[in-house]
Image (spheres, rainbow, N blue to C red):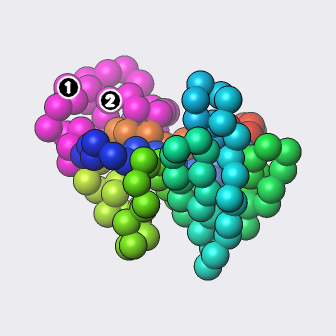
Amino acid sequence: MPADPHRVVLLRRVEALDGPARVTAFLDLRAGFGRGRMHDLKQEDGVWTGRSGALRFRWTGAGRARPAGAGLTLAVELAAGEKHDLVLEISDQAPPGELPDPGRLWAATEAAWAQVAPDCSDLPVPPRRRFCGDCGAGGGSGVRLRRRWRPGIWL
């Protein structure tokens, strides 16, 4: 949210809450129910672009990603308190000329969710332990990591 009929925008925020964290993100976009592999991969000014079938994609925040197997792999290392945003745009049209601003996109998403999501402030789960798309302040899709938890994130 907010929606666009020609473009999907996936936001992911990685935060190291209690200590340093290392996260690996792997992107293997496949159109046609898995038949269309990524091709025409290009990295320019820290932004990856490519295609899969008739779809185009742009991945920002992943400038250090490298080709690996059939996709792209990115290692993100964060110190305690740091965060890193990844934005994946998938479209049947060329991406807009302007790069996405993760802060603006998060704000628009949170505002849209605030209009439709129920108030979950009375849930017994503390806000700091709420994850990925559940109710509460800052809902939406975010990944929060603790020092003892260092899994890979598969997009």
Residue at the extreme bottom: 45
Q: Amino acid at mark 1?
A: Pro
Disc 2 secondary structure class: loop
Q: Total number of numbered labels?
A: 2
Identify whether 142 is placed above or below 76. above
Quick one: which residue is furthest to the right in this view? 69
Q: Is residue 88 left or right of residue 4?
A: right
Q: Quadrant of the N terminus?
A: top left
* Tag 1 near tag 2, CB within 8 Å: yes
Residue visible at 69% across and 60% down in the picture: 41
Task: Tell me the distance, in whole angstroms, between the alpha carbons under discs 1 and 2.
Answer: 7 Å
Mark 1 is surrounded, within 10 Å at the Cα level, by few (under 14), some (14 to 19) or many (20 or more) other residues, namely few
Most foreground residue, 81 or 52: 52
First in sequence, mark 1 or 2: give its number: 1
Which residue is tagged 1? 118
Magenta segment = 110-137
Provide the residue designation for mark 2.
135
Q: Position of residue 132 (x, y in %)?
A: 47, 33
Crowd rating for badge 2 (residues with CA inside 10 Å; few <14, some 14–19, many 20+):
some
Q: Is residue 123 magenta?
A: yes
Q: Amino acid at mark 2?
A: Cys
Q: Element at badge 1? A: loop
Residue 98, compared with residue 35, is above or below; it is below
